[in-house]
Image (cartoon, rainbow, N blue to C red):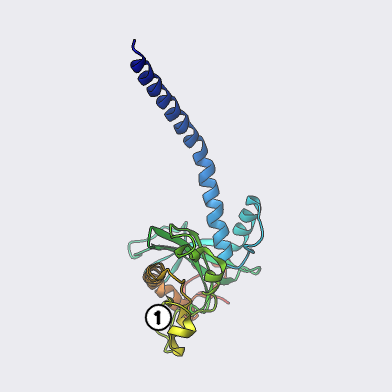
């Protein structure tokens, strides 16, 4: 056998061995990767709810403990009715969406969290937006996955940008839904005073990222608007013990 054939055979064998090893490693690591992703998502939900400090480190067990005690995953339909995830939807239920409720020590609802999954400049932006039970005021925002440019659009993951959302309003001064926009620069410099409660400061050099994020959030929040209206009108005022019938206006209790 010639040296060339020997070299080719060795290269093919090496590629085969490496491929098998990489496949085996990826298969064995997949459950661990999935678990890390679950913990990271739960951690970001807790951050949006203001239940943990992002400057501190938390063990996975602590994240699970806090999440189980203070967060309840529910569903909301197109009419803004919140349902237990274990309650089967009947034929009248349409456009069922996930929502997370933040629960207080007395099992009262403190806020609700909406998953954000929208287009960015280079890929999808994933995060969570927390809203007060007034159905109007944003209480937290986090991003846990994105593909934006570091130092530019990537600033959406930074605390300074996410803190901009706290206290902003989803409705204008007339009470009409307008979502929350990302200004092209500082809000004080480019947005009229009456619209400032509905805008956050933009990121220098990342106008498109801000534009895509704002447009995507408007679309997502619009889908959840019937539920937000119910919160604004105090139709959702129940405690968790009344699940699954707890969102009926006639039976709700304070």
Is 189 rendered above or below residue 82? below
* Residue at the spot 43% in from the left edge and 61% down from the top edge: 125
Q: Name the residue carrying label 1.
A: 177
Above or below, 27 relative to 248:
above
Question: Residue 182: x, y in percent?
Answer: 43, 75
Q: Give 250 or 31, whichever is nearer the viewer.
A: 31
Q: Residue at x 54, y 65 (%)?
A: 158
Q: Residue furthest top?
A: 1
Percent position (x, y) of residue 61?
Answer: 65, 51
Examine the rendering and report whether any part of residue 244 can be seen.
no
Locate the N terminus and report the quarter of the image it occupies: top left
Q: Nearer the viewer, residue 102 or 128?
A: 128
Q: Residue furthest front?
A: 3
| Image coordinates for residue 80, horizontal then vertical, percent | 41, 71
Of residue 76 and residue 122, the one placed in the foreground of this image is 122
On screen, 71 above or below 186?
above
Residue 79: horizontal and vertical position, in percent?
38, 72
Of residue 227 and residue 151, the one placed in the foreground of this image is 151
Location of residue 213 with respect to 174 vertically, above or below: above
Q: Residue at x 55, y 48 (%)?
A: 36
Q: Secondary structure at mark 1?
A: loop
Q: In the rendered image, which quarter contains the C terminus? A: bottom right
């Amino acid at each position: 056998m010639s040296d060339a054939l020997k070299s080719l055979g060795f290269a093919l064998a090496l590629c085969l061995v490496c491929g098998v090893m990489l496949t085996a490693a990826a298969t064995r690591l997949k459950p661990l990767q999935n678990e890390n992703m679950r913990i990271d998502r739960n951690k970001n939900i807790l951050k949006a709810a203001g239940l943990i400090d992002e400057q501190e480190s938390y063990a996975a067990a602590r994240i699970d403990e806090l999440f189980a005690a203070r967060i309840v995953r529910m569903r909301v339909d197109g009419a803004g009715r919140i349902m237990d995830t274990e309650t089967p939807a009947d034929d009248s239920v349409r456009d069922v969406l996930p929502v997370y409720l933040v629960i207080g020590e007395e099992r009262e609802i403190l806020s609700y969290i909406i998953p954000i999954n929208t287009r960015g400049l280079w890929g999808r932006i994933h995060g969570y937006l927390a809203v007060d039970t007034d159905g109007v005021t944003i209480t937290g925002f986090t991003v846990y996955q994105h593909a934006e440019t570091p130092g530019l659009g990537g600033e959406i993951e930074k605390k300074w940008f996410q803190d901009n959302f706290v206290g902003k309003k989803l409705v204008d001064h007339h009470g009409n839904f307008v979502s929350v926009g990302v200004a092209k620069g500082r809000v004080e410099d480019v947005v009229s005073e009456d619209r400032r409660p509905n805008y956050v400061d933009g990121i220098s050099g990342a106008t498109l990222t801000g534009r895509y994020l704002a447009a995507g959030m408007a679309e997502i929040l619009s889908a959840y608007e019937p539920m937000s209206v119910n919160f604004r009108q105090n139709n959702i005022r129940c405690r968790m013990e009344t699940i699954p019938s707890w969102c009926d206006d006639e039976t709700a209790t304070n």
